[in-house]
Amino acid sequence: MAPHTNHAVIYSPQSAPTPPNMDIRALRGLGIRFIRFQWVDLTNNVRYRVIPRAYFEKMLASPRPSICILTVGLGAVFLKIADGFAADSEYLYVPDMSSVRTLPYKPGHASVLGWFEDKAPVPGRITMEAELCPRRILRQVTETARSVSGVEFLVGFETEFILLTSTKFPVTTVHNLQGYSNSLALPTGSVTEKALEEIVDALEASGVEVQMYHAEAAPGQYEIVTVPLPPLQAVDALVHTRQTIYNIASKHGLRATLAPRIHDYSCGSAAHAHISVHSATDSASKGPKFTIQESAFLAGLLEHLPATLPFTLPLPASYKRMVDGIFSGGTYVCWGTDNREVPVRLCNATSPASRNFEVKTIDGTANPYLALAALLGAGHKGIASGSVLTMKDCAGPSAAERGEDGRQALGISERLPLTWDEARQKLQGSDVMTEIFGENFVQKYLSVNALMAHALDKPPTEAEKLALLVETY
């Protein structure tokens, strides 16, 4: 292959860093005094218990290392319990030591994620792992793809966020009206420049590799891009990245928000995922655009994309980004080479070793374990069933600009859900999403999702609703 064919830094599943899998001696050696034992609930709120290291050591030495968490710790919203959950039911939460990261913004503290498990065997189930555990679901999707189809994935995330000086009415951003990558948005010595640099230093000190950071297009908006990793590692790193952004922004007197769109006159904030498909049995030289596996993955992803939206765009507020012409991916089910107005953008099309699909229909209110499980599960369904990609490349003008005849010529025939209610209907009618998550999980997720949506809609004015949204995300 000619040297000029590939560009960009090349990543592969084999080159991905091995998780540290720290033991208690390593934590002692790093001066860690407290462990933040954290989880991400079904509404994408990060919760944690702080455990002194001495007790954490005893816990790890116990017959079944864990803490007890009420199941409503996954399904409660502002002290209200969603349908399908009970206040008298508990899970065990078991630490996954491969997820341990130090917290440079809080010296002496480290965080660890884990797995939800049933306390005792459940009749009819062969595992103790809890049905509602988001990390388990993502791991299961990736293991199924590997065992059934010999396929692995790498995922890199773009974290877009807005820095606020006030979350009260009126919600006020830091002074940054200059826009995308403009140097005036990060002047040396400014509070934003200091905060961004400290965030990146903290991420790299904790083992999260950063590709770049820059100002984005909306007022007060910035973006941090982290490197591709295997799916579970990638989402663990994303959760850590977001916590680092929140905490260091707070240290500088700011509030970071992942809210989907706070200005109607500008673009919104997303959590774009760059997904690459890897298979030992498929050669990257089989076609000018795609390998056989990539083509089938894209076909499956496009076919089931509408049903993924309740996981990737989970709130009514998320659909303020479901608009054509604001670089959020547009409103039609389609793909395109380097086109920012399609939901699935083909990046590095001429570089087989760094080629990837950027999925734009994700925002920061989504639980990223569930969002990625839905997307990868949809794509793998295409691979496993041998789906054939018939839709043509929507390069150049957007689907909205092409008109009906132009869309038909490319095979673009379906619009994405434009509202929260429509997206939920798509999920409820999807056999594939039910197969990936299980019927019980889908019903309980929809229950929690509705409770959160209604809670965020409760304030009487739009200004108060926005204030609650940015305080929550």
Image (cartoon, rainbow, N blue to C red):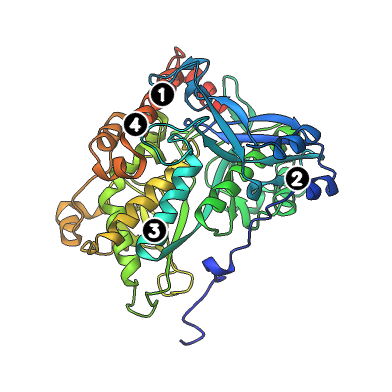
Which of pointers 2 and 3 lies earlier in the amino acid sequence?
Answer: 3
Displayed quadrant of residue 51: top right
Q: CA distance from mark 2 to mark 3?
A: 42 Å
Q: Given the image, on which type of amino acid does mark 2 rest?
A: Lys
Q: Choose mark 4 or mark 2, whichever is in front.
A: 4
Identify the residue at horizontal 37%, vertical 35% (top origin).
319
Closer to us: 236 or 330 = 236
Q: CA distance from mark 1 to mark 4?
A: 20 Å
Closer to us: 217 or 133 = 133
Identify the residue at horizontal 43%, vertical 21% (top origin).
85
Which of pointers 1 and 3 lies earlier in the amino acid sequence?
Answer: 3
Q: Position of residue 105 (x, y in %)?
A: 76, 40
Residue ID for mark 2:
194
Q: Given the image, on which type of amino acid does mark 1 rest?
A: Ala
Which of pointers 4 and 3 lies earlier in the amino acid sequence?
Answer: 3
Displayed quadrant of residue 131: top left
Q: Secondary structure at mark 2?
A: helix
Q: Secondary structure at mark 1?
A: helix
